[in-house]
């Protein structure tokens, strides 16, 4: 089974070009995932990150849809944890569950809720990432007391989601003006 589905001839992008673009997204997402793990936490709450790798997942969802967006999210988490030396640790499982939940939520909002801006989708992704992490942590430690930490994570998710959404919005605007990615878009920009 391949990560990318075969495209008929004459579509907007050849499968080779799509594979190259997909690979670049995975590499960039992995790099951001690892780099962000090395940055000291600027927030007063432990475990809070800016979520820069989420920008790459949103780009994949925006241009290629759910299947490829999920593949980018899963690949960046697995590769990032392998590079960071935390594969199959509790941190990996929490990151993986957060990535899966947030990718599903963002894909649903992009596909079925056009009233949400890309910034709104990013904030929803940040919040749902924290929901996934809290659920994984509750399962791992077998305690419901972890849910008391959720309001603090929510407090951090809103501004971090706004920042990543703003970065992505600026990036999409610039790419749209330059016309670089017009052939890649699965939907109009």
Image (spheres, rainbow, N blue to C red):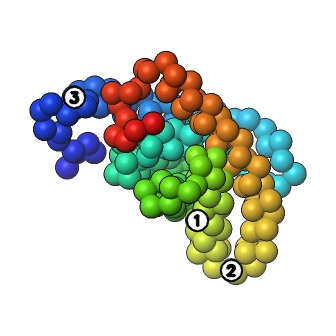
Q: Say whether disc 2 or disc 3 marks the residue closer to the N-terminus.
A: 3
Residue at the image point whose x is 73% and y is 73% from the top: 146
Residue 15 on image: x %, y %? 22, 32
Q: Residue furthest right?
A: 44
Kindly report which numbered mark, 2 or 1, lies closer to the viewer in this rendering. Answer: 1
Q: Which residue is mark 3?
A: 14
Mark 3 lies on a secondary structure that is loop
Q: Which residue is mark 1?
A: 132
Q: Residue furthest left?
A: 9
Residue 79 seen in the current view: no
Residue 61 on image: x %, y %? 43, 46
Residue 135 seen in the current view: yes
Label ID, residue 143: 2
Label ID, residue 54: none
Separation of residues labelled 2 and 1 (CA atoms) = 15 Å
Quarter where residue 22 is shown: top left
Residue closer to the observer: 23 or 187: 187
Is 74 situated above or below 137? above
Separation of residues labelled 2 and 3 (CA atoms) = 49 Å
Kindly report which numbered mark, 2 or 3, lies closer to the viewer in this rendering. Answer: 3
Residue at the image point whose x is 81% and y is 63% from the top: 152
């Amino acid at each position: 089974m391949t990560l990318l589905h075969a495209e008929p001839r004459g579509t907007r992008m050849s499968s080779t070009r799509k594979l190259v673009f997909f690979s670049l997204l995975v590499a960039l997402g992995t790099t951001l995932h690892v780099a962000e793990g090395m940055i000291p936490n600027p927030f007063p709450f432990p475990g809070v990150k800016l979520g820069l790798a989420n920008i790459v997942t949103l780009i994949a969802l925006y241009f290629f849809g759910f299947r490829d967006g999920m593949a980018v999210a899963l690949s960046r988490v697995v590769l990032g944890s392998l590079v960071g030396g935390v594969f199959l640790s509790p941190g990996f499982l929490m990151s993986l569950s957060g990535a899966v939940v947030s990718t599903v939520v963002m894909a649903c909002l992009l596909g079925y809720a056009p009233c949400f801006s890309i910034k709104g989708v990013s904030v929803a992704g940040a919040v749902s990432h924290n929901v996934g992490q809290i659920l994984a942590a509750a399962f791992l430690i077998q305690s419901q007391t972890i849910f008391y930490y959720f309001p603090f994570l929510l407090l951090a998710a809103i501004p971090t989601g706004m920042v990543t959404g703003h970065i992505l919005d600026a990036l999409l605007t610039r790419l749209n003006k330059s016309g670089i990615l017009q052939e890649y878009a699965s939907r109009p920009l």
